[in-house]
Image (cartoon, rainbow, N blue to C red):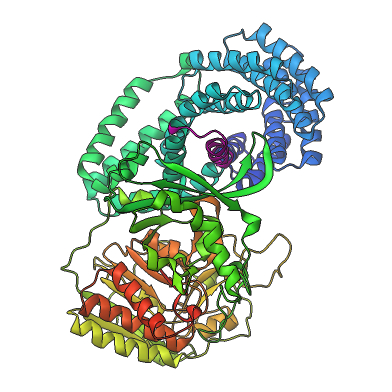
Amino acid sequence: MLGKEHPDYASSLHSLAILYSDKGDYTKAEPLFLEAKNIRAKVLGKEHPSYTTSLNNLAGIYLKKGDYTKAEPLYLEAKDIRAKVLGKEHPAYAWSLEYLATLYRDKGDYTKAEPLYLEAKGIMAKVLGKEHPNYAWGLYNLASLYSDKGDYTKAEPLFLEAKDIRVKVLGKEHPTYAWNLGDLSFLYQVTLRIPEARQTWLELNPLIQRLINQSATYSSENQMDAYVRTFDGHINKCFSFAQAHPSPEILRTAYDNALFFNGYLLENARSLARAYDHAGPAARDTFERWQGCLRRLAGEYTKPIAERRFVAETEAEAEVYEKALTRNLAAFGETRKQPHWNDVCDRLNADEAAVEFVRYPFFNPKRTDSVIYAAFILKPGWDSPRMVTLFEEKSIRFDGDAAQHSNELYAARGVKPLLQGNNKHTIDLYRLIWEPLQTHLKGTKKVYFATSGQLAQLNMGAIPIGKGKVLADRYTLAQLGSTRQLIKPRAFSTQNQTALLFGGIRYEADTAAIAQANTSLGHAIASRGLLDIADTDSTLKKDKWDYLPGTENEVNAIEKILLTGGLEPRTGRSYAATEEAFKAIGSAGQASPRVLHVATHGFFFPEVKDGQYDANEPVFKTSDNPLIRSGLILSGGNHAWQTGRPIRPGMEDGILTAYEISQMNLSNTELVVLSACETGLGDIQGNEGVYGLQRAFKIAGAKYLIMSLWQVPDRQTSLLMTAFYKKWLVEKLPVPEAFRAAQNELRDAGLDPYQWAGFVLVE
């Protein structure tokens, strides 16, 4: 054992910090860099090269976070040490100049930055030569300075020279080549050379997708989340360029970007988990060997071509494993295949259209203060998508409580709709969102659509279009997570005829009754990294959840309909509706039920801004992870809600978070119904959409999800649910048609829209 004050331990910390930093996870990287720096200062001394490396990398974290006050003295200290120990013609000293110059450039102090960049470039050329990757960095950074200053005449030749060196020495699959292309595209746009900008975009987009896919094969979901976020600017600039300079080629690549990035992490998590979980021992071994090859390649690709070792051999080995996986695991093959606009187009019938909504800060070519909503439209036979700019985000206004600021605690499934208020507002929604699309939707009867941003809070079908009509009267609407889903629809076996219903749940503590219910499960509960709130929260919460009498009647009525429809229902009522029973679903080799209906309280807490919460608040209110800030309440949940502890040690606490649901296996479940208040809410995070219960059930593998966007009265909820199941199982309508018919039934009965339009169906 080396101990925590050994240089090798510091090196391990440093390497891990670099990994997090490269993925954009600066929160995890900073303390590791700090610890490594302190160990090196103590053990190696402050004039050791490793100590200066720690200084620079820690300063780099602060620079990326915009904390110039912390970054500058670290860069200066490293520069002075290197000048003293290594001399001013050493490459390491040149890098210190580069780092310090970049800090001044980011601060807008170009007068200080330029001479430092020039000095560093001169050292690199003299010591390393003009075909070295570090010299390319010197050119690139100096070009970026001139570009920031608006001196594009000086910037362009430097960008081009850096690009040529990188192609020759590193190859076109290197991330720095992608960055070069992005900067050149900006330069071409700002100098009004649109054809050159277009060609650069067409090369850049597929390259970035390949880089992300490569990283996804060996990175955790959290690492991928941070890594994908580093490309947010690229996505937004691509959509902005398509808006400003539409052409068939650019519209195709922009729509491909939407297909690729919209819910990328969600789809990646679902597909890889599906492939790995269903694989046998041999396939799992192949999968792990393939990941090992890609990890080695990722390290080699960062080196100059001349210094790489066994790349061709490792690439060949990885290809063998990948082909075997693609051949033997259908789900894995889906993960590796990049979707394209024409794949979606080929799936549409003559009277159908696909609409992919996107939201992006507008760049022209520099970033503006506008956030734009637009739609990509596809119809059969088109040679490219159409793009329609819709509105600025500030044009959307919700009356009453917007979804992100809705009540945090619900005593019942209760009162205020999201879209209440005068008709002018809701008709404006049609004018803003759908009226601009009408020219392209002539002759269309069915529209597949995927939302983005604040549009996820709307029931599109309920938007009035005038004269007592709503949008669902004009089109058959099918809401998807992404129109990418049209490429390969999921099929479910009709042999699975089981159903599980939760309702009439008792939320107060009854140790004996709950313990007896858990004993009757008869097998161990699978726990794949599930979170136990009791382990992390010992605070008090004085509110409690009230019994919902309507949910027991709802479950009783639905149980009879399921029996009539040929299904085999089981129920979790009263104290038997435990968290243990819920987590047993799909575990221990058992297939999940075809139908999972949950009638209970749901909760969602919005993201807390830095420094604006009490340290004693419970974890499910303050967690950084939005999947922990949303969930469902099951039997006995009041005890943990009030005390922060389960009823008895070793038992679950009755607070089922979305995070816990996301770890379950619901791959055999065709339909999940969340008959609870505001179960459709969650944090809206860029291209990944809503982080909450709906995301959790999608990751778990469910096909259809019925959920609520606002609080719907208890009685009307039960009416809608029983009507839906009759339409689906007795009248044999497909799930989407049955859901629309049920909502129309309540609407025709004279119910106000907020009493039936709060529920949406998402595939």
Q: Can residue 582 be seen in this view?
A: yes
Q: Quadrant of residue 14?
A: top right
Q: Quadrant of residue 51?
A: top right
Depicted 677 relative to depicted 22: above or below: below
Q: Is residue 20 visible?
A: no
Identify the main secondary structure in magenta. helix
Is 278 within the magenta?
no
Q: Position of residue 536 (x, y in %)?
A: 57, 68
Q: Position of residue 37 (x, y in %)?
A: 69, 37
Residue nearer the viewer, 352 or 660: 352
Residue visible at 57% across and 39% down in the picture: 240
The answer to whether 391 appears left or right of 615 in the picture is: left
Image quarter hosting the C terminus: bottom left
Depicted 170 relative to depicted 12: above or below: above
The answer to whether 583 appears left or right of 139 in the picture is: left
Q: Position of residue 165 (x, y in %)?
A: 55, 13
Q: Where is residue 355 in the image (x, y as percent from the top left)?
A: 42, 51
Is 234 within the magenta?
yes
Depicted 491 relative to depicted 203: above or below: below
Residue visible at 42% across and 53% down in the picture: 266
Depicted 217 relative to depicted 273: above or below: above
Residue nearer the viewer, 157 or 172: 157
Residue nearer the viewer, 473 or 99: 473
Residue nearer the viewer, 511 or 155: 155
Question: Which region shows up in magenta?
Answer: 230-248
Residue visible at 20% across and 78% down in the picture: 567
Q: In which quarter of the image is residue 333?
A: top left
